[in-house]
Amino acid sequence: MAIHPLAGQLAPHDSLVNLPELLTSYYLKKPNVEHNAEERVSFGTSGHRGSALSVSFNENHILAISQAIAEYRLSQNITGPLYVGKDTHALSEAAFQTVLSVLTANGVRVRVQLNGGFTPTPVISHAILTHNQTQSDTSDGLVITPSHNPPEDGGIKYNSSKGGPADKEITDWVAKRANDLLLANLVDVKTFSQEEVNASGLIEEFDYISHYVNDLENVIDMEVIAKANIRIGVDPMGGSGIHYWKPIAERYGLDITVVNTEVDPTFRFVPVDKDGRIRMDCSSPYSMSGLLKLKDDFDIAVGNDPDYDRHGIVCAQSGLMNPNAYLGVAIEYLSQHRSLWSKDIQFGKTLVSSGMIDRVIKGVNATLCEVPVGFKWYVEGMYEGAMAFGGEESAGASFLRKDGKVWTTDKDGFILALLAAEILAVTGKDPHSLYMEQVEKYGKPFYKRIDVAATPAQKAILGALDTKNVTQTELAGETITSVLTHAPGNGAAIGGLKVSTENGWFAARPSGTENVYKIYLESFISEQHLAELEEEAKSLVSSVLNA
Protein backbone atom coordinates (compact mmCIF):
# COMPACT_ATOMS: atom_id res chain seq x y z
CA MET A 1 0.00 0.00 0.00
CA ALA A 2 1.32 3.44 -0.95
CA ILE A 3 1.82 5.82 1.95
CA HIS A 4 -0.75 8.62 1.90
CA PRO A 5 0.79 12.09 1.31
CA LEU A 6 -0.76 13.37 4.56
CA ALA A 7 0.53 10.47 6.70
CA GLY A 8 1.93 11.84 9.95
CA GLN A 9 0.21 15.22 9.51
CA LEU A 10 -3.00 16.59 10.98
CA ALA A 11 -6.14 15.92 8.97
CA PRO A 12 -7.76 18.74 6.99
CA HIS A 13 -10.84 20.09 8.74
CA ASP A 14 -13.18 18.97 5.96
CA SER A 15 -12.09 15.35 6.43
CA LEU A 16 -13.04 15.18 10.11
CA VAL A 17 -16.02 13.06 11.10
CA ASN A 18 -19.33 14.93 11.03
CA LEU A 19 -20.44 14.38 14.61
CA PRO A 20 -24.10 15.50 14.18
CA GLU A 21 -24.47 13.13 11.21
CA LEU A 22 -22.79 10.30 13.11
CA LEU A 23 -24.96 10.62 16.21
CA THR A 24 -28.14 11.11 14.22
CA SER A 25 -27.30 7.91 12.33
CA TYR A 26 -26.86 6.05 15.61
CA TYR A 27 -30.49 6.74 16.55
CA LEU A 28 -32.25 6.86 13.18
CA LYS A 29 -30.60 4.17 11.04
CA LYS A 30 -31.99 0.70 11.70
CA PRO A 31 -30.13 -2.51 10.80
CA ASN A 32 -31.76 -4.96 8.40
CA VAL A 33 -30.43 -8.14 9.96
CA GLU A 34 -32.67 -10.42 7.93
CA HIS A 35 -31.27 -9.44 4.55
CA ASN A 36 -27.87 -7.88 5.28
CA ALA A 37 -25.29 -9.97 7.14
CA GLU A 38 -23.00 -6.96 7.60
CA GLU A 39 -25.67 -5.27 9.72
CA ARG A 40 -26.00 -8.17 12.19
CA VAL A 41 -24.38 -8.36 15.61
CA SER A 42 -21.04 -10.11 15.23
CA PHE A 43 -18.41 -10.59 17.92
CA GLY A 44 -14.84 -10.73 16.66
CA THR A 45 -11.69 -11.05 18.74
CA SER A 46 -12.57 -7.83 20.57
CA GLY A 47 -16.35 -7.59 20.65
CA HIS A 48 -18.85 -6.09 18.24
CA ARG A 49 -17.55 -3.14 16.21
CA GLY A 50 -18.86 -0.95 13.43
CA SER A 51 -20.04 2.52 12.52
CA ALA A 52 -23.46 4.13 12.76
CA LEU A 53 -22.89 5.54 9.27
CA SER A 54 -22.70 2.04 7.76
CA VAL A 55 -25.53 0.71 9.98
CA SER A 56 -23.21 -1.68 11.80
CA PHE A 57 -23.15 0.02 15.20
CA ASN A 58 -26.49 1.64 16.01
CA GLU A 59 -28.89 2.03 18.89
CA ASN A 60 -30.77 -1.14 17.97
CA HIS A 61 -27.55 -3.17 18.08
CA ILE A 62 -26.74 -1.92 21.58
CA LEU A 63 -30.31 -2.41 22.80
CA ALA A 64 -30.19 -6.03 21.65
CA ILE A 65 -26.66 -6.73 22.93
CA SER A 66 -27.42 -5.21 26.35
CA GLN A 67 -30.60 -7.25 26.70
CA ALA A 68 -28.77 -10.42 25.66
CA ILE A 69 -26.06 -9.78 28.27
CA ALA A 70 -28.65 -9.14 30.98
CA GLU A 71 -30.29 -12.46 30.12
CA TYR A 72 -26.95 -14.26 30.02
CA ARG A 73 -26.06 -12.94 33.50
CA LEU A 74 -29.41 -14.16 34.79
CA SER A 75 -28.87 -17.61 33.30
CA GLN A 76 -25.46 -17.84 35.00
CA ASN A 77 -26.63 -16.44 38.35
CA ILE A 78 -24.25 -13.48 38.08
CA THR A 79 -25.73 -11.13 40.66
CA GLY A 80 -22.89 -8.72 41.44
CA PRO A 81 -22.55 -5.27 39.91
CA LEU A 82 -21.69 -5.00 36.23
CA TYR A 83 -18.59 -2.80 35.84
CA VAL A 84 -19.08 -0.56 32.80
CA GLY A 85 -16.45 1.57 31.08
CA LYS A 86 -16.46 3.78 28.01
CA ASP A 87 -13.74 5.43 25.97
CA THR A 88 -13.67 8.82 24.23
CA HIS A 89 -15.18 7.91 20.86
CA ALA A 90 -18.39 9.84 20.09
CA LEU A 91 -20.48 6.68 19.75
CA SER A 92 -19.23 5.39 23.10
CA GLU A 93 -21.21 8.00 25.03
CA ALA A 94 -24.37 7.31 23.03
CA ALA A 95 -24.00 3.55 23.51
CA PHE A 96 -23.24 4.05 27.21
CA GLN A 97 -26.62 5.70 27.76
CA THR A 98 -28.37 2.92 25.81
CA VAL A 99 -26.60 0.28 27.91
CA LEU A 100 -27.67 1.94 31.17
CA SER A 101 -31.28 2.11 30.00
CA VAL A 102 -31.46 -1.62 29.27
CA LEU A 103 -29.41 -2.91 32.19
CA THR A 104 -31.30 -0.95 34.84
CA ALA A 105 -34.63 -1.97 33.30
CA ASN A 106 -33.45 -5.56 33.79
CA GLY A 107 -32.58 -4.91 37.43
CA VAL A 108 -28.82 -5.00 36.93
CA ARG A 109 -26.61 -2.97 39.26
CA VAL A 110 -24.09 -0.97 37.24
CA ARG A 111 -20.83 0.57 38.47
CA VAL A 112 -19.68 3.65 36.55
CA GLN A 113 -16.82 6.12 36.90
CA LEU A 114 -17.17 8.46 39.87
CA ASN A 115 -18.26 11.93 38.67
CA GLY A 116 -18.66 10.63 35.14
CA GLY A 117 -15.78 10.35 32.72
CA PHE A 118 -13.98 7.54 30.97
CA THR A 119 -12.72 4.15 32.07
CA PRO A 120 -9.94 2.17 30.32
CA THR A 121 -10.31 -1.50 29.40
CA PRO A 122 -7.62 -2.80 31.83
CA VAL A 123 -9.20 -0.85 34.69
CA ILE A 124 -12.50 -2.69 34.13
CA SER A 125 -10.67 -6.03 34.12
CA HIS A 126 -8.82 -5.10 37.32
CA ALA A 127 -12.07 -4.03 39.03
CA ILE A 128 -13.86 -7.27 38.12
CA LEU A 129 -11.01 -9.42 39.41
CA THR A 130 -10.51 -7.56 42.68
CA HIS A 131 -14.26 -7.61 43.31
CA ASN A 132 -14.57 -11.33 42.75
CA GLN A 133 -11.58 -12.06 44.98
CA THR A 134 -13.05 -10.20 47.95
CA GLN A 135 -16.86 -10.23 47.60
CA SER A 136 -19.42 -13.01 47.91
CA ASP A 137 -21.31 -12.12 44.73
CA THR A 138 -19.92 -12.41 41.20
CA SER A 139 -19.30 -9.48 38.85
CA ASP A 140 -18.47 -9.03 35.19
CA GLY A 141 -18.04 -6.05 32.87
CA LEU A 142 -18.75 -4.18 29.67
CA VAL A 143 -16.30 -1.95 27.83
CA ILE A 144 -17.73 0.43 25.24
CA THR A 145 -14.89 1.03 22.79
CA PRO A 146 -13.72 0.28 19.25
CA SER A 147 -10.14 0.44 20.53
CA HIS A 148 -7.83 2.30 18.10
CA ASN A 149 -10.38 2.39 15.26
CA PRO A 150 -11.25 5.69 13.51
CA PRO A 151 -13.45 8.36 15.16
CA GLU A 152 -16.63 7.29 13.34
CA ASP A 153 -16.49 3.78 14.79
CA GLY A 154 -18.08 2.28 17.88
CA GLY A 155 -17.52 -0.95 19.76
CA ILE A 156 -18.70 -2.96 22.74
CA LYS A 157 -17.19 -6.02 24.38
CA TYR A 158 -18.25 -8.22 27.26
CA ASN A 159 -15.72 -9.19 29.91
CA SER A 160 -16.56 -12.33 31.86
CA SER A 161 -16.30 -12.89 35.60
CA LYS A 162 -12.67 -13.90 34.98
CA GLY A 163 -11.97 -10.31 33.99
CA GLY A 164 -11.00 -10.76 30.36
CA PRO A 165 -12.76 -10.90 27.00
CA ALA A 166 -15.54 -13.47 27.09
CA ASP A 167 -14.78 -16.73 25.30
CA LYS A 168 -16.34 -17.72 21.99
CA GLU A 169 -19.04 -19.86 23.56
CA ILE A 170 -20.33 -16.86 25.50
CA THR A 171 -20.05 -14.33 22.68
CA ASP A 172 -21.71 -16.72 20.22
CA TRP A 173 -24.64 -17.04 22.64
CA VAL A 174 -24.87 -13.25 23.10
CA ALA A 175 -24.63 -12.58 19.36
CA LYS A 176 -27.32 -15.15 18.49
CA ARG A 177 -29.68 -13.85 21.16
CA ALA A 178 -29.07 -10.24 20.08
CA ASN A 179 -29.77 -11.04 16.44
CA ASP A 180 -32.94 -12.92 17.42
CA LEU A 181 -34.06 -9.84 19.34
CA LEU A 182 -33.37 -7.65 16.32
CA LEU A 183 -35.32 -10.00 14.03
CA ALA A 184 -38.26 -9.77 16.44
CA ASN A 185 -38.17 -5.95 16.33
CA LEU A 186 -36.82 -5.73 19.90
CA VAL A 187 -40.18 -6.58 21.48
CA ASP A 188 -38.46 -8.42 24.36
CA VAL A 189 -35.98 -5.64 25.10
CA LYS A 190 -36.62 -3.86 28.39
CA THR A 191 -35.73 -0.17 28.61
CA PHE A 192 -35.96 2.67 31.12
CA SER A 193 -36.30 6.35 30.37
CA GLN A 194 -33.51 8.64 31.60
CA GLU A 195 -35.68 9.60 34.57
CA GLU A 196 -36.31 5.94 35.42
CA VAL A 197 -32.60 5.16 35.15
CA ASN A 198 -31.77 7.97 37.57
CA ALA A 199 -34.51 6.89 39.98
CA SER A 200 -33.67 3.18 39.84
CA GLY A 201 -30.98 3.25 42.49
CA LEU A 202 -29.03 0.78 40.34
CA ILE A 203 -26.31 3.18 39.12
CA GLU A 204 -23.39 3.04 41.56
CA GLU A 205 -20.53 5.51 41.24
CA PHE A 206 -17.13 3.88 41.72
CA ASP A 207 -13.69 5.47 42.07
CA TYR A 208 -11.99 3.47 39.35
CA ILE A 209 -8.98 5.81 39.28
CA SER A 210 -7.93 5.42 42.92
CA HIS A 211 -8.80 1.73 42.96
CA TYR A 212 -6.46 1.04 40.04
CA VAL A 213 -3.70 3.59 40.67
CA ASN A 214 -3.20 2.62 44.34
CA ASP A 215 -2.65 -1.00 43.33
CA LEU A 216 -0.05 -0.36 40.61
CA GLU A 217 2.88 -0.77 42.99
CA ASN A 218 1.98 -4.45 43.23
CA VAL A 219 2.66 -5.05 39.54
CA ILE A 220 5.34 -2.44 38.69
CA ASP A 221 8.39 -1.40 40.76
CA MET A 222 7.29 2.23 41.06
CA GLU A 223 9.89 2.99 43.74
CA VAL A 224 12.84 2.18 41.51
CA ILE A 225 11.43 4.38 38.72
CA ALA A 226 11.07 7.29 41.14
CA LYS A 227 14.56 6.86 42.58
CA ALA A 228 16.10 6.79 39.10
CA ASN A 229 14.29 10.04 38.18
CA ILE A 230 13.18 8.61 34.85
CA ARG A 231 11.62 11.37 32.75
CA ILE A 232 8.45 9.95 31.21
CA GLY A 233 6.51 11.65 28.43
CA VAL A 234 2.91 10.56 27.83
CA ASP A 235 0.62 11.13 24.87
CA PRO A 236 -2.83 9.81 25.86
CA MET A 237 -3.94 10.31 22.22
CA GLY A 238 -7.22 11.70 23.55
CA GLY A 239 -8.02 8.39 25.21
CA SER A 240 -9.77 7.11 28.32
CA GLY A 241 -6.63 7.04 30.48
CA ILE A 242 -5.98 10.75 30.26
CA HIS A 243 -7.03 11.44 33.87
CA TYR A 244 -4.94 8.60 35.33
CA TRP A 245 -1.42 9.91 34.72
CA LYS A 246 -1.50 12.82 37.17
CA PRO A 247 -2.68 10.59 40.07
CA ILE A 248 0.00 8.04 39.12
CA ALA A 249 2.68 10.73 39.19
CA GLU A 250 1.46 12.15 42.50
CA ARG A 251 0.94 8.79 44.21
CA TYR A 252 4.41 7.45 43.36
CA GLY A 253 6.50 10.60 42.94
CA LEU A 254 7.18 10.04 39.24
CA ASP A 255 8.39 12.60 36.70
CA ILE A 256 5.54 12.35 34.18
CA THR A 257 4.68 14.97 31.58
CA VAL A 258 1.41 14.63 29.68
CA VAL A 259 2.20 16.26 26.34
CA ASN A 260 -1.38 16.51 25.08
CA THR A 261 -4.42 16.94 27.30
CA GLU A 262 -7.03 17.34 24.56
CA VAL A 263 -10.15 15.17 24.41
CA ASP A 264 -12.23 15.66 21.27
CA PRO A 265 -14.31 12.91 19.61
CA THR A 266 -13.13 14.03 16.16
CA PHE A 267 -9.56 13.23 17.31
CA ARG A 268 -8.46 16.13 15.12
CA PHE A 269 -5.17 16.37 17.08
CA VAL A 270 -4.04 12.83 16.12
CA PRO A 271 -1.90 12.77 12.94
CA VAL A 272 -3.37 10.61 10.20
CA ASP A 273 -2.14 7.06 9.67
CA LYS A 274 -0.40 5.67 6.60
CA ASP A 275 -3.68 5.41 4.66
CA GLY A 276 -4.71 9.01 5.35
CA ARG A 277 -7.30 8.13 8.01
CA ILE A 278 -7.25 9.19 11.63
CA ARG A 279 -6.53 6.09 13.64
CA MET A 280 -5.39 6.26 17.25
CA ASP A 281 -2.85 3.49 16.78
CA CYS A 282 0.04 3.88 19.20
CA SER A 283 2.07 1.32 17.24
CA SER A 284 2.00 3.49 14.10
CA PRO A 285 4.89 5.95 13.60
CA TYR A 286 2.50 8.16 11.62
CA SER A 287 -0.19 8.39 14.31
CA MET A 288 2.56 8.82 16.92
CA SER A 289 4.50 11.45 14.97
CA GLY A 290 3.56 14.19 17.44
CA LEU A 291 5.15 12.34 20.35
CA LEU A 292 8.11 11.26 18.25
CA LYS A 293 9.02 14.92 17.69
CA LEU A 294 9.38 15.27 21.47
CA LYS A 295 11.33 12.06 22.12
CA ASP A 296 14.56 13.88 23.00
CA ASP A 297 12.81 15.60 25.90
CA PHE A 298 12.28 12.34 27.79
CA ASP A 299 14.09 9.16 28.81
CA ILE A 300 11.01 7.12 27.87
CA ALA A 301 7.89 8.32 26.06
CA VAL A 302 4.68 6.33 25.74
CA GLY A 303 1.39 6.48 23.90
CA ASN A 304 -1.83 4.53 24.28
CA ASP A 305 -4.95 3.96 22.21
CA PRO A 306 -8.40 5.25 23.32
CA ASP A 307 -9.28 2.32 25.60
CA TYR A 308 -5.71 1.85 26.87
CA ASP A 309 -5.32 -1.80 25.97
CA ARG A 310 -2.38 -1.00 23.67
CA HIS A 311 1.00 0.60 24.25
CA GLY A 312 3.54 2.45 22.13
CA ILE A 313 7.09 2.73 23.50
CA VAL A 314 9.37 5.55 22.32
CA CYS A 315 13.06 5.48 23.21
CA ALA A 316 15.05 8.71 23.11
CA GLN A 317 17.77 7.52 20.73
CA SER A 318 15.82 5.22 18.42
CA GLY A 319 12.18 6.32 18.30
CA LEU A 320 9.08 4.11 18.29
CA MET A 321 9.76 0.46 19.03
CA ASN A 322 8.27 -2.28 16.92
CA PRO A 323 5.57 -3.96 19.08
CA ASN A 324 7.06 -7.42 18.50
CA ALA A 325 10.49 -6.20 19.57
CA TYR A 326 9.20 -4.75 22.83
CA LEU A 327 7.31 -7.94 23.71
CA GLY A 328 10.53 -9.94 23.52
CA VAL A 329 12.39 -7.43 25.70
CA ALA A 330 9.56 -7.35 28.25
CA ILE A 331 9.48 -11.14 28.49
CA GLU A 332 13.23 -11.46 28.99
CA TYR A 333 13.28 -8.71 31.63
CA LEU A 334 10.30 -10.04 33.57
CA SER A 335 11.68 -13.58 33.55
CA GLN A 336 14.80 -12.27 35.29
CA HIS A 337 13.27 -9.69 37.66
CA ARG A 338 10.18 -11.33 39.12
CA SER A 339 11.69 -13.63 41.71
CA LEU A 340 8.35 -14.75 43.16
CA TRP A 341 7.07 -16.09 39.84
CA SER A 342 7.08 -19.85 39.44
CA LYS A 343 10.05 -21.15 37.45
CA ASP A 344 7.84 -23.37 35.27
CA ILE A 345 5.33 -20.63 34.46
CA GLN A 346 4.33 -20.05 30.82
CA PHE A 347 4.88 -17.02 28.60
CA GLY A 348 2.26 -16.55 25.91
CA LYS A 349 2.42 -15.27 22.35
CA THR A 350 0.03 -15.37 19.41
CA LEU A 351 0.91 -17.44 16.35
CA VAL A 352 1.42 -14.28 14.29
CA SER A 353 3.86 -12.65 16.72
CA SER A 354 7.58 -12.60 15.98
CA GLY A 355 9.66 -15.75 16.12
CA MET A 356 12.15 -13.65 18.10
CA ILE A 357 9.85 -14.21 21.08
CA ASP A 358 10.21 -17.99 20.66
CA ARG A 359 14.00 -17.63 20.67
CA VAL A 360 14.01 -15.33 23.69
CA ILE A 361 11.77 -17.64 25.73
CA LYS A 362 13.96 -20.61 24.85
CA GLY A 363 17.05 -18.56 25.71
CA VAL A 364 15.84 -17.84 29.25
CA ASN A 365 14.78 -21.47 29.74
CA ALA A 366 11.11 -20.56 30.05
CA THR A 367 8.02 -22.27 28.62
CA LEU A 368 6.28 -20.93 25.51
CA CYS A 369 2.51 -21.10 25.01
CA GLU A 370 1.51 -20.23 21.44
CA VAL A 371 -2.18 -19.43 20.91
CA PRO A 372 -4.47 -18.12 18.13
CA VAL A 373 -5.09 -14.40 17.59
CA GLY A 374 -7.18 -12.85 20.37
CA PHE A 375 -6.38 -12.01 23.99
CA LYS A 376 -9.25 -14.21 25.16
CA TRP A 377 -6.92 -17.21 24.78
CA TYR A 378 -4.82 -15.92 27.69
CA VAL A 379 -7.66 -15.31 30.13
CA GLU A 380 -7.78 -18.73 31.78
CA GLY A 381 -4.01 -19.08 32.18
CA MET A 382 -3.52 -15.58 33.61
CA TYR A 383 -6.57 -15.95 35.84
CA GLU A 384 -5.13 -19.13 37.34
CA GLY A 385 -1.61 -17.67 37.58
CA ALA A 386 -0.20 -20.29 35.19
CA MET A 387 0.48 -17.72 32.42
CA ALA A 388 3.00 -15.06 33.46
CA PHE A 389 2.68 -12.93 30.35
CA GLY A 390 0.35 -12.76 27.38
CA GLY A 391 1.20 -10.60 24.39
CA GLU A 392 -0.10 -9.80 20.93
CA GLU A 393 1.77 -8.54 17.87
CA SER A 394 -0.62 -5.57 17.74
CA ALA A 395 0.97 -3.93 20.80
CA GLY A 396 -1.23 -5.41 23.51
CA ALA A 397 -0.09 -7.36 26.56
CA SER A 398 -0.49 -7.91 30.29
CA PHE A 399 1.37 -9.82 32.99
CA LEU A 400 1.05 -11.03 36.57
CA ARG A 401 1.55 -9.11 39.78
CA LYS A 402 4.98 -9.22 41.40
CA ASP A 403 3.76 -12.01 43.70
CA GLY A 404 2.69 -14.16 40.75
CA LYS A 405 -1.06 -13.58 41.11
CA VAL A 406 -3.42 -12.21 38.48
CA TRP A 407 -3.38 -8.47 37.73
CA THR A 408 -5.62 -8.15 34.67
CA THR A 409 -6.82 -10.69 32.14
CA ASP A 410 -7.19 -8.06 29.45
CA LYS A 411 -4.48 -6.06 27.72
CA ASP A 412 -3.06 -3.28 29.89
CA GLY A 413 -1.36 -0.36 28.19
CA PHE A 414 -0.54 1.35 31.48
CA ILE A 415 1.67 -1.38 32.91
CA LEU A 416 3.49 -2.05 29.63
CA ALA A 417 4.24 1.67 29.41
CA LEU A 418 5.43 1.85 33.02
CA LEU A 419 7.44 -1.35 32.58
CA ALA A 420 9.58 0.42 29.97
CA ALA A 421 10.51 2.97 32.62
CA GLU A 422 11.21 0.21 35.16
CA ILE A 423 13.45 -1.58 32.66
CA LEU A 424 15.48 1.58 32.11
CA ALA A 425 15.69 2.31 35.85
CA VAL A 426 16.87 -1.21 36.74
CA THR A 427 19.17 -2.04 33.83
CA GLY A 428 20.38 1.41 32.85
CA LYS A 429 19.43 0.53 29.26
CA ASP A 430 16.29 1.45 27.38
CA PRO A 431 14.20 -1.30 25.78
CA HIS A 432 15.57 -0.63 22.29
CA SER A 433 19.15 -1.12 23.47
CA LEU A 434 18.16 -4.42 25.05
CA TYR A 435 16.41 -5.44 21.83
CA MET A 436 19.60 -4.81 19.85
CA GLU A 437 21.38 -7.15 22.26
CA GLN A 438 18.76 -9.79 21.49
CA VAL A 439 19.31 -9.27 17.75
CA GLU A 440 23.03 -9.81 18.25
CA LYS A 441 22.31 -13.03 20.13
CA TYR A 442 19.34 -14.50 18.23
CA GLY A 443 19.44 -12.93 14.76
CA LYS A 444 17.61 -10.06 13.07
CA PRO A 445 13.97 -10.63 12.14
CA PHE A 446 12.30 -9.06 9.11
CA TYR A 447 8.55 -8.92 9.72
CA LYS A 448 5.61 -7.83 7.56
CA ARG A 449 1.81 -7.99 7.43
CA ILE A 450 -0.24 -7.56 4.26
CA ASP A 451 -3.91 -7.76 3.26
CA VAL A 452 -5.03 -9.72 0.20
CA ALA A 453 -8.50 -9.40 -1.35
CA ALA A 454 -10.73 -12.44 -0.83
CA THR A 455 -14.38 -13.30 -1.36
CA PRO A 456 -16.53 -14.41 1.59
CA ALA A 457 -16.46 -17.93 0.14
CA GLN A 458 -12.65 -17.91 -0.01
CA LYS A 459 -12.46 -16.58 3.54
CA ALA A 460 -14.65 -19.46 4.68
CA ILE A 461 -12.36 -21.97 2.94
CA LEU A 462 -9.27 -20.44 4.53
CA GLY A 463 -10.86 -20.48 7.96
CA ALA A 464 -11.61 -24.20 7.70
CA LEU A 465 -8.33 -25.49 6.24
CA ASP A 466 -6.76 -28.79 7.22
CA THR A 467 -3.02 -29.50 7.20
CA LYS A 468 -3.53 -32.00 4.38
CA ASN A 469 -4.50 -29.07 2.13
CA VAL A 470 -0.84 -28.06 2.04
CA THR A 471 1.17 -30.46 -0.11
CA GLN A 472 4.31 -28.37 -0.67
CA THR A 473 7.51 -29.46 1.06
CA GLU A 474 9.55 -26.27 0.61
CA LEU A 475 8.99 -22.56 1.22
CA ALA A 476 11.35 -19.83 -0.01
CA GLY A 477 14.22 -22.28 -0.44
CA GLU A 478 13.89 -24.01 2.91
CA THR A 479 12.26 -27.26 3.98
CA ILE A 480 8.87 -26.79 5.62
CA THR A 481 9.17 -27.91 9.24
CA SER A 482 5.56 -27.47 10.32
CA VAL A 483 2.09 -26.74 8.97
CA LEU A 484 -0.39 -25.66 11.63
CA THR A 485 -4.14 -25.12 11.59
CA HIS A 486 -4.39 -25.40 15.38
CA ALA A 487 -2.31 -23.60 17.99
CA PRO A 488 0.30 -25.79 19.72
CA GLY A 489 -0.23 -24.01 23.04
CA ASN A 490 -3.89 -24.92 23.52
CA GLY A 491 -5.01 -26.91 20.49
CA ALA A 492 -7.50 -24.21 19.45
CA ALA A 493 -8.21 -23.65 15.76
CA ILE A 494 -6.25 -20.83 14.17
CA GLY A 495 -8.98 -20.04 11.67
CA GLY A 496 -6.33 -20.24 8.95
CA LEU A 497 -2.87 -21.75 8.72
CA LYS A 498 0.76 -21.18 9.65
CA VAL A 499 3.66 -22.63 7.66
CA SER A 500 7.18 -22.56 9.11
CA THR A 501 10.76 -23.30 8.09
CA GLU A 502 13.96 -23.04 10.09
CA ASN A 503 14.43 -19.34 9.34
CA GLY A 504 11.03 -18.11 8.26
CA TRP A 505 7.29 -18.52 8.47
CA PHE A 506 4.00 -17.13 7.24
CA ALA A 507 0.49 -17.26 8.62
CA ALA A 508 -2.74 -16.54 6.75
CA ARG A 509 -6.14 -15.94 8.31
CA PRO A 510 -9.36 -14.31 7.08
CA SER A 511 -10.37 -10.89 8.35
CA GLY A 512 -13.46 -10.89 10.52
CA THR A 513 -14.68 -7.53 9.22
CA GLU A 514 -13.36 -7.04 5.65
CA ASN A 515 -13.25 -9.06 2.44
CA VAL A 516 -9.54 -9.73 2.76
CA TYR A 517 -7.27 -12.27 4.32
CA LYS A 518 -4.22 -11.23 6.31
CA ILE A 519 -0.78 -12.68 5.67
CA TYR A 520 1.88 -12.36 8.36
CA LEU A 521 5.47 -13.05 7.31
CA GLU A 522 8.85 -13.18 8.97
CA SER A 523 12.37 -14.00 7.84
CA PHE A 524 15.50 -14.32 9.94
CA ILE A 525 17.65 -14.15 6.79
CA SER A 526 17.05 -10.96 4.80
CA GLU A 527 14.56 -8.56 3.22
CA GLN A 528 15.01 -10.47 -0.05
CA HIS A 529 14.09 -13.72 1.69
CA LEU A 530 11.03 -11.98 3.16
CA ALA A 531 9.99 -10.95 -0.35
CA GLU A 532 10.36 -14.56 -1.50
CA LEU A 533 8.26 -15.69 1.45
CA GLU A 534 5.56 -13.20 0.50
CA GLU A 535 5.45 -14.31 -3.12
CA GLU A 536 5.34 -18.01 -2.29
CA ALA A 537 2.88 -17.53 0.56
CA LYS A 538 0.44 -15.75 -1.75
CA SER A 539 0.89 -18.48 -4.34
CA LEU A 540 0.41 -21.27 -1.81
CA VAL A 541 -2.74 -19.75 -0.31
CA SER A 542 -4.14 -18.99 -3.76
CA SER A 543 -3.61 -22.59 -4.89
CA VAL A 544 -5.45 -23.85 -1.81
CA LEU A 545 -8.35 -21.40 -2.21
CA ASN A 546 -8.76 -22.14 -5.89
CA ALA A 547 -8.22 -25.90 -5.75
Image (cartoon, rainbow, N blue to C red):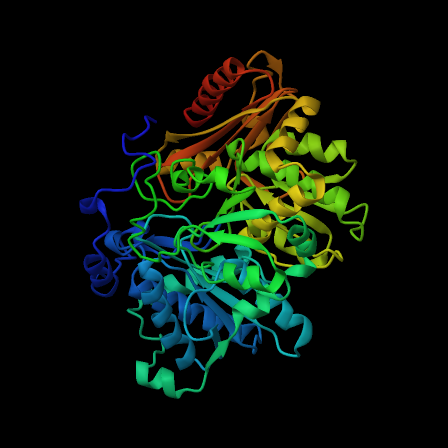
In depth, the one of 460 and 66 nearer the eye is: 66
In depth, the one of 357 and 503 nearer the eye is: 357
Q: Hey, which quadrant is residue 420 in on the image?
A: top right
The tally of labels here is 0
Q: Does the rendering let one see residue 193?
A: no
Would you say 194 lies left or right of 168 here? left
Q: In the figure, 53 relative to 498: above or below?
A: below
Q: Classify the position of the C terminus by image quarter.
A: top left
Q: Hey, which quadrant is residue 526 in on the image?
A: top right
Q: What residue is drawn where x is 31% and y is 81%?
A: 194
Would you say 300 lies left or right of 56 here? right
Q: What residue is drawn where x is 58% and y is 69%?
A: 211
Residue furthest top as drawn: 477
Q: In the figure, 77 relative to 304: above or below?
A: below
Q: Classify the position of the N terminus by image quarter.
A: top left
Would you say 452 lies left or right of 220 here? left
Q: What residue is drawn where x is 56% and y is 59%?
A: 249
Q: Does the rendering let one see residue 289?
A: yes
Q: In the figure, 81 relative to 534: above or below?
A: below
Task: Give the x, y percent position of residue 424.
Answer: 65, 42
Q: Hey, which quadrant is residue 58 in on the image?
A: bottom left
Task: Give the x, y percent position of residue 51.
Answer: 30, 53
In depth, the one of 28 and 456 nearer the eye is: 28
Task: Give the x, y percent position of residue 151.
Answer: 31, 51
Task: Give the x, y percent position of residue 456.
Answer: 36, 38
